[in-house]
Amino acid sequence: MNVTKISIVVFLACFTQLAHSQESIHWMSWDEAIAKSKITKKKIFIDVYTDWCGWCKKMDKTTFQNPEVINLINENYYPVKFDAEYKKDIELNGNTYKYVSSGRRGYHELASALLRGRMSYPSIVFLNEDFELIQPIQGFQDAENLEMMLSYFAGNYHKTTPWKRFMANYHSEEKPTQKTVPVKYQPSN
């Protein structure tokens, strides 16, 4: 009898932990993403923000709270939240990136490199499994647009399908049933 009760308690604890794990994005530091990537390769999703950016805060409160977005990011990417005004050096792909003082506010060289010099916030950046730039995207993204982008890059559609064709054939689902990229893209003939 005690073994049955213990089994039920363990099952419920595991189930609760699994359910809780998808309630928010598991943001990482650069060091954590690099370390995890050495064990298991995944693409990198970067939210480039500043503390003073109102649209960045809105994206945190809306888009990054959407269950579909949370699931897609946590399952398919190592997510990094990166302050474009970060003051410490960052080593990435054999390069050292530093903070650059510029007037009242400065910027981090890595933010400039990731955004190809177009310093606009919020911005999101997709890197491949080797931390090479796939695509930076400037501006606020609502959950529906971000979900489509996350699926596009996670499914490697960016390698074979133009974005406009992908968007035209993309179909939302109420709730993905897979832990990987949901099948939402229906190629046209």
Image (cartoon, rainbow, N blue to C red):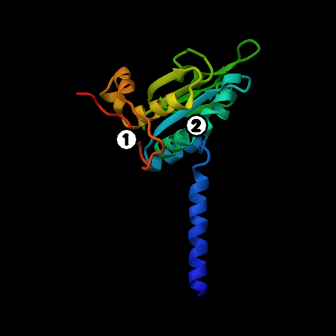
Residue type marked 2: Val
Q: Residues within 10 Å of mark 2 (few under 14, many from 20)?
A: many
SS for dot 1: loop
- Which of 1 and 100 lies nearest the eye of the viewer? 1
Q: Secondary structure at mark 2?
A: strand
Mark 1, mark 2: which one is toward the viewer? 1
**Residue 116: where, in percent of width, then height?**
51, 17
Q: Is residue 185 above or below residue 35?
A: above
175, above or below 4, in the image: above
- The one of 25 and 48 positioned closer to us in this rendering: 25
Q: Residue at x 46, y 47 (%)?
A: 38
Residue 114 horizontal side relative to residue 51, left or right: left
Furthest toward the front, the residue is 174
Q: Quadrant of the N terminus?
A: bottom right
On screen, residue 143 versus residue 151, left or right, reads right
Q: Which mark is residue 183?
A: 1
Q: Is residue 121 visible?
A: yes
What residue is drawn where x is 58% and y is 56%? Answer: 19
Q: Quadrant of residue 32?
A: top right
Q: Earlier in the sequence, mark 1 or mark 2?
A: 2
- Residue 104 is situated, as x and y percent measured from the top left of the image, at 77, 14
Residue 8 in picture, x, y percent from top left = 58, 75
- Residue 125: mark: none
- The residue that mark 2 highlights is 80
Name the kind of residue labelled 1 in the image.
Answer: Val
The quadrant in which the C terminus is found is top left
Residue in the picture at 40% in, 33% down: 171
Which quadrant of the view contains residue 91?
A: top right
Decide: few, some or many residues near mark 1? Use Cα within 10 Å; few <14, some 14-19, many ≥20: some
* Residue drawn where x is 49% and y is 36% of the image: 44
Alpha carbon distance from label 1 to label 2: 25 Å
